[in-house]
Image (cartoon, rainbow, N blue to C red):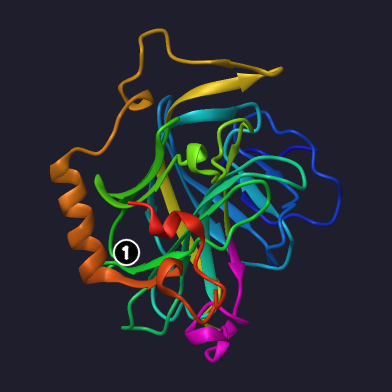
Amino acid sequence: WTVPLSSYLYYSHSPLRQRPSSLRFTPELSTRSLISLGVMVVGKSSTTESFSLFLSIEPLALDFNPRKEYLFGKIDMQLKLVPGNSAGTVTAYYLKSKGDTWDEIDFEFLGNLTGDPYVMHTNVYTQGKGDREQQFNLWFDPTADFHTYSVLWNPHHIVFLVDGIAIRQFKNLEHRGIQYPKLQPMRLYSSLWNADQWATRGGLVKTDWSNAPFTASYRNFRADACVSFAGKSSCPASSPRWFTQKLDLTAEDKMRVVQSKFMVYNYCTDTKRFPQGVPKECNIH
């Protein structure tokens, strides 16, 4: 069944069918314990669409464009995160392929008590294996206005950007025996879910449901990307700049400054977690 985009949506357990729009809801197949989503389309034009996610009770994820899978690209999304006491909640925006040995590129925003900073959590999965978390405190209030969170994914590297500033780089080091996501096309999803068993202070602070509904807002999604269909990838007619783009020295310097000031967790330095040695890529510069 379908509903108008202008509606305020909560879904039952009935099977979900494709909607007459690029917005579709699909069951989330990863190991995340999603709670649910409701959606309100705030504004719509021929080129942009603004909408909000509301935390409720159903295990669903938002598939931004169910007809498109991407194999490399530059993805931009503007988000305004859950305001006030958002402890226990996680707003996620990520690329993910299908199957049990999936690839995935994650932006996740871990809520916190009013006045405490959000933690931005990033991760890269290859062949179903992640454990490559880097976390940052943001240098602005992400609940006060929209900010742009971007993924640059090409054959050379994956770069996470905030308002155009690179904050993390995961290089293609296949020649050194390190897996890199390059064969599995991914779809773009978002979700707003309850993760109070770990999200805020290691699970010490639980979600306060008296503050519900928890609302995250999205707008100006843009995908300048190669689209995969029936096993073939089609890229923009003109050779896209992002396909060969690397970080110049200025961008790398800015990234290092951001990491030195705002990074609060780096898997590459967590020797307690990896007593037999940190992952191989951590020792390659």
Residue occupying image coordinates x 59% and y 58%: 130
Q: Secondary structure at mark 1?
A: loop
Q: Residue furthest right?
A: 14
Q: Residue 40: x percent and y percent?
A: 54, 51
Does residue 2 sit above or below 52 in this rendering? above
For mark 1, what is the residue?
142
Does residue 228 sit above or below 78 in this rendering? above
How many numbered discs? Answer: 1
Q: Residue 33: x percent and y percent?
A: 70, 67
For the record, the magenta segment spans 192-209
Report which quarter residue 261 is drawn in.
Answer: bottom left
Q: Main secondary structure of the magenta part?
A: loop
Relative side of 264 to 259, left or right: right
Residue occupying image coordinates x 59% and y 31%: 22
Residue occupying image coordinates x 54% and y 74%: 274
Quadrant of the image for the N terminus?
A: top right
Q: Residue 101: x percent and y percent?
A: 73, 46
Does residue 229 sit above or below 273 in this rendering? above
> Looking at the image, which is closer to me, 214 or 9?
214
Q: Was residue 199 drawn as part of the magenta stretch in this picture?
A: yes
Q: Residue 115: x percent and y percent?
A: 31, 83
> Is residue 163 something that shows in the picture?
no
Three-letter amino acid code at disc 1?
Answer: Pro
Q: Was residue 162 drawn as part of the magenta stretch in this picture?
A: no
CA neighbours of label 1 inside 10 A, class few (<14), some (14 to 19), many (20+)? some
Report which quarter residue 276 is drawn in.
Answer: bottom right
Q: Residue furthest bottom?
A: 204
Does residue 225 sit above or below 118 in this rendering? above
Relative side of 64 to 113, left or right: right
